[in-house]
Image (spheres, helix red, strand yellow):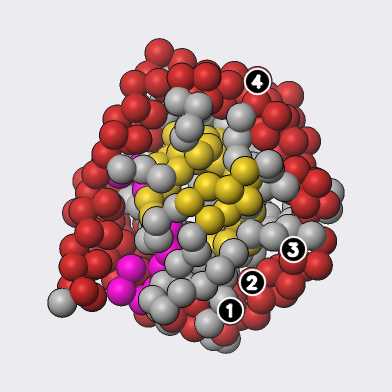
């Protein structure tokens, strides 16, 4: 992974198993949830909708499609391994079969799911546990030879919102992700991205402080993934619901881009791509 002059630390190519994939940065990652209980009902896709939604996202400019089979919303209970596999592996197989050039990511903290997903066509692993919820994850990803996203989360989805406290949320998240970045590289993972985990064990005030301090995370030298889409940090401020939070999402995505985010993980691809283009135009001028 190679940096360039831009403060967003773009990289020209990722090693995905036996090939290099060139990716423009900032990039947009579209969310495809094959779950019945994701916090934003509009993001849930059944088998009949999956390919149509994937095609719409790719045509709108998504560089990555992130497919998950287990909800990680606050308060979510753990989905059994067999059920997660039953949901996510057929979905990845189907999308990969119809869109073989698309870069697919599997959203999982389990090494077994990661291995099966890459075998089915995924080319990236997005891990909310940063290798700590499953101690085999880092060695598995290193063996698979795919890029990896390590996210900060305090606790587990079931308990992460039980009175989270930080002395300095940006400093603590940066320190944590620095350690996980080092661990991932030491295990042999070549391409690692970091995600501050907006909404994962953080209050709305913590989330906005973290967004304000995002530039500090970029100094770790890894691409930063911002997952702000339709989250509580928007709705608690604006008095909206996730279904009404598209405009608020675009506002926060724009702030994240201006503070160095390299990847936007979103439900609404077209709006995020427009934000990327407009922020880029401002920089070029």
Mark 2 crowd level (few <14, some 14–19, many ≥20, 10 Å Cα):
many
* Disc 4 secondary structure class: helix
Which class describes the residues within 10 Å of circle 1: few (<14), some (14-19), or many (20+)? some
- Whichever of labels 4 and 3 marks the residue nearer the N terminus, that label is 4
* Quadrant in the picture for residue 178: bottom right
Q: Sequence order check: which comes first, mark 3 or mark 2?
A: 2
- Residue at the disc numbered 4: 86
Q: Is residue 243 magenta?
A: no
Q: Is residue 252 left or right of residue 213?
A: left
Graded by Cα atoms within 10 Å as few (under 14), some (14 to 19) or many (20 or more), the crowding at tag 4 reads few
**Residue 165's quadrant in the figure?**
bottom right
Residues tagged 1 and 2 counted as in contact (Cβ below 8 A): yes
N-terminal label among 1 and 2: 2
Q: Report the mark closest to the observer, 4 or 3.
A: 3
Q: Camera-side residue: 263 or 144? A: 144
At 64% from the left and 71% from the top, the residue drawn is: 177
Q: Where 165 falls versus 71 (above or below)?
A: below
Q: Quadrant of the N terminus?
A: bottom right
Q: Nearer the viewer, mark 1 or mark 2?
A: 1
The residue closer to the viewer here, 284 or 59, is 284
Who comes first in sequence, dot 4 or dot 2? 4
How far is disc 4 from disc 2 in space, using C-alphas?
31 Å
In the structure shown, which secondary structural element does the residue marked by tag 3 occupy? helix
**In the rendered image, which quarter contains the C terminus?**
bottom left
Element class at badge 2: helix
* Spatial separation of the CA atoms under disc 1 and disc 2: 9 Å
At horizontal 63% and vertical 61% (from top left) the residue drawn is 192
Q: Which residue is mark 2?
A: 177
Which circle marks residue 220 in the picture? 1
Labels 1 and 4: the sequence-earlier one = 4
Residue 17 visible in the snapshot: yes
């Amino acid at each position: 992974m190679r940096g360039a002059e831009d403060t967003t630390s773009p990289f020209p190519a990722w090693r995905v198993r036996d090939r290099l994939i060139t990716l423009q940065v900032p990039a947009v990652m579209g969310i495809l949830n094959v779950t019945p209980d994701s916090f934003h009902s509009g993001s849930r896709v059944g088998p009949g909708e999956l390919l149509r939604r994937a095609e719409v996202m790719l045509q709108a400019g998504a560089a990555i499609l992130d497919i998950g089979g287990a909800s990680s919303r606050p308060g979510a209970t753990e989905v059994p391994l067999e059920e997660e596999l039953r949901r996510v592996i057929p979905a990845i197989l189907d999308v990969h079969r119809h869109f073989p050039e698309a870069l697919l990511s599997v959203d999982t903290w389990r090494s077994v799911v990661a291995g099966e997903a890459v075998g089915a066509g995924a080319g990236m692993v997005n891990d909310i546990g940063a290798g700590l919820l499953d101690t085999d994850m880092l060695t598995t990803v290193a063996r698979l030879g795919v890029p990896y996203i390590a996210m900060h989360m305090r606790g587990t989805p079931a308990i992460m919102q039980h009175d989270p406290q930080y002395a300095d949320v940006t400093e603590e998240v940066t320190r944590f992700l620095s350690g996980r970045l080092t661990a991932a590289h030491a295990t042999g993972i070549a391409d690692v991205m970091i995600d501050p985990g907006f909404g994962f064990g953080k209050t709305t005030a913590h989330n906005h402080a973290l967004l304000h301090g995002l530039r500090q995370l970029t100094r770790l030298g890894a691409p930063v993934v911002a997952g702000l889409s339709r989250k509580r940090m928007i709705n608690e401020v604006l008095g909206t619901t996730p279904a009404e939070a598209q405009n608020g999402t675009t506002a926060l995505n724009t702030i994240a881009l201006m503070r160095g985010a390299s990847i936007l993980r979103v439900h609404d691809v077209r709006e995020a791509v427009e934000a990327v283009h407009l922020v880029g135009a401002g920089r070029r001028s």
